[in-house]
Image (tube, rainbow, N blue to C red):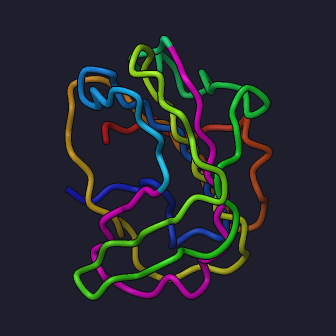
């Protein structure tokens, strides 16, 4: 399923937050050093290569409204820059600038901000999995770089 997560390359700027449940992760004493997203290879990410990635713990299991963001100042920036590796099979990897110690008790929220102006003409560029809850929210705009407190859609990742 293609969704507009973690970013929306066919808009100038985008921001998303996704909740990953502890029961899905179950990573005892884990230090998160790298994350990856599966890109569909539909179009180019040339205008979408300035990423910031944030992580933190949350008791939330979903987002109840389009504006129920976890405040950015409660998250820790773990990455800033271009994707570390884009593999031939479509996986985009990020070697985190700052590792994240996951406590295996709380749920994990990952926020992704894409800060480079410009866009591609293709949408739905990442594979996502469907769930019955609103576990992700996102914002996108062609000309306004988000201040990380706006939303215009709720989607199921």
Image coords of residue 35 (percent x, y):
43, 56
Label total for image: 0
Picture residue at 78% right of the left edge, 59% below the top: 144
Examine the structure image and report whether residue 42 is included in the region drawn in magenta. Answer: yes
Q: What span is colored magenta in the figure?
A: 34-58
Say left or right for 147 vs 87: right
Picture residue at 61% right of the left edge, 77% below the top: 49
Picture residue at 22% right of the left edge, 81% below the top: 89
Say left or right for 59 vs 91: right
Image coords of residue 82 (percent x, y):
62, 76
Identify which residue, 75 or 143, lies in the foreground.
75
The image quadrant of residue 75 is top right
Picture residue at 56% right of the left edge, 88% below the top: 46
Going by the picture, which residue comes out furthest to the front?
Answer: 29
Above or below residue 140? Residue 71 is above
Examine the structure image and report whether residue 54 is included in the region drawn in magenta. Answer: yes
Identify which residue, 57 or 135, lies in the foreground.
57
Say left or right for 90 vs 20: left
Image coords of residue 56 (percent x, y):
59, 30
């Amino acid at each position: 399923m293609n969704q507009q997560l973690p970013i929306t390359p066919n808009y100038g700027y985008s921001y998303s937050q996704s909740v990953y449940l502890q029961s899905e992760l179950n990573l005892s004493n884990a230090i998160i050093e790298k994350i990856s997203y599966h890109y569909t290879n539909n179009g180019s990410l040339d205008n979408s290569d300035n990423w910031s990635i944030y992580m933190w713990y949350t008791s939330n299991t979903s987002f109840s409204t389009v504006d129920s963001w976890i405040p950015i100042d409660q998250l820790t920036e773990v990455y800033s820059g271009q994707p570390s590796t884009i593999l031939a099979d479509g996986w985009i990897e990020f070697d985190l600038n700052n590792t994240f110690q996951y406590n295996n008790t709380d749920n994990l929220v990952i926020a992704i901000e894409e800060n480079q102006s410009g866009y591609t003409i293709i949408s739905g560029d990442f594979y996502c999995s469907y769930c019955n809850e609103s576990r992700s929210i996102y914002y996108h705009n062609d000309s306004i770089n988000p201040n990380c407190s706006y939303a215009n859609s709720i989607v199921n990742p």
